[in-house]
Amino acid sequence: MNIADLILVSVDDHVVEPPDMFDNHLPEKFRSLAPKVIRAADGSDVWLYEGQQLPNIGLNAVSGKPPEEYGIDPTTFAEMRKGCYDIDERVRDMDANGVLGSMCFPSFPQFCGQLFSRTEDRTVALAMLQAYNDWHIDEWCGAYPGRFIPLSLPPIWDAELMAAEVRRVAAKGCHAVTFSENPEKLGWPSFHNDHWDPFWEAVSETGTVVCLHIGSSSELTITSIEAPINVMISLQPLNIVQAAADILWSRVLVKFPDVRFALSEGGTGWIPYFLERVDYVYEHHRAWTGQDMPGNMLPSEVFKERFITCFIDDAVGMKNRYDVGVETMCWECDYPHSDSTWPESPERLMRSLDGVPDDEINAITHENAMRIFNYDPFSVRPREECTVGALRANAVDVNVEPVSSGKVLVRPDAPIRIIDLAERAAPTPAPD
């Protein structure tokens, strides 16, 4: 297949929320309580909510910057590429990259709405979360029909409210919800607890996919707080490996046969060994552990039926795609994060797809995502206008060359360490 003929749907991108996002979606009585963007003492733009300043960490919005200017310091909207937070510019950047569709995870509320779960007044918390979901579905995704897969936040503090919100947004056309890769790490019950049953029932009923993004437990896989940050970046996908094992052996898959999990940004190269291992464990230990699998299936068979796997750039996964499961593999761009392949995603992806038959390429690049997430862009625009070549032809005026922010960066003498990230990412109290 030629690069120009690819059709690309990314199931993992990110939105840096614009300052006016709450303006049209909150009842009058809550508007004064809404998060707002202010200029912090260090000159960065931060969200202010309930007395806490929440920075936009630089690595969350680096697309369009020279790699040598990547960093973990908080940033301003003026320093970001407009496609990070402006929907019109986002679509232009998608066109320039040849990407038809995108699902966007949140930024300042955290991956599964942890910010709102910390709100003391639960009525206010739910109002903020529903306003966020309405903005995301109606404005961000709704501005360009056929270009986005909507993704909702859950009111994670109440399983019954979660179920109600899943049903509410499903009626608006949203069939994906974020959740934590390990809710116990957030102070909630684990996957092995019946606490979440109303939520599992709702996602089963509505055909909603539960998306688990690396880092959604608010914890990093680290060896030492003093380790260079490259250690943490290298180990990030291991959060998803742990989540896969946790869920695979949980009661969820037995009791709720229609629940599907997407392992977002976890890659696929590790999966063949993981499946070999869980089958071995099942064979050797089930007699004394008492573990059963749904329908007397092997764990590997259950995994391939119930989990959606996602990758950015994964040549090893492509070579072993039959062991991973071609019918559930999906592609990601990760715009505008530091792992993103924008604006050369088609070229980077094509290297991994060398020798893959066209029908399998189509499945991995868009057909799986369309089926799994109830997404039908071809109902909005003709298929021939959805290819990399057609989209890029509409964006020849978009500058995709790196643009310097003009800042003079001082490189540390020693490697950046995880302790630096922890300090700079933490919310800080607003000044009196």
Image (spheres, helix red, strand yellow):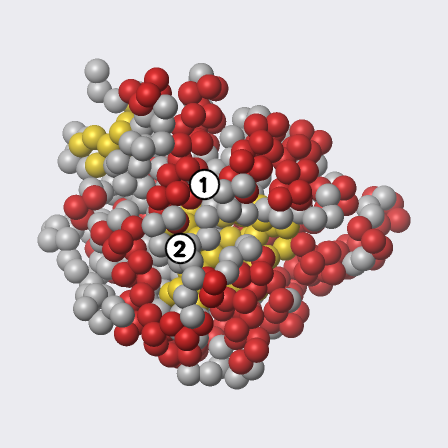
Q: Where is residue 345 drawn, in percent x and y?
A: 37, 68
Q: Which residue is mark 2?
A: 145
Residue 111, label in figure = 1
Q: Outermost residue, right direction?
A: 287
What is the total number of numbered labels drawn onto the structure image? 2
Q: Give the class, few, some or many, for how many residues have Cα within 10 Å of label 1's Cα (few <14, many ≥20).
A: many
Residue depicted at 53% across the width and 61% down the height: 370
Q: Which quadrant would residue 280 be assigned to in this image?
A: bottom right
Residue depicted at 42% across the width and 44% down the height: 137
Comes first in the chain, label 1 or label 2: 1
Q: Which quadrant would residue 101 be assigned to in this image?
A: bottom left
Q: Are marks 1 and 2 in contact (CB under 8 Å)?
A: no
Which amino acid type is marked by label 1? Answer: Phe
User: Residue 144: in sight, yes or no?
Assistant: yes
Quarter holding the C terminus is: top left
Q: Is 252 left, or right, of 348 in this rendering?
A: right
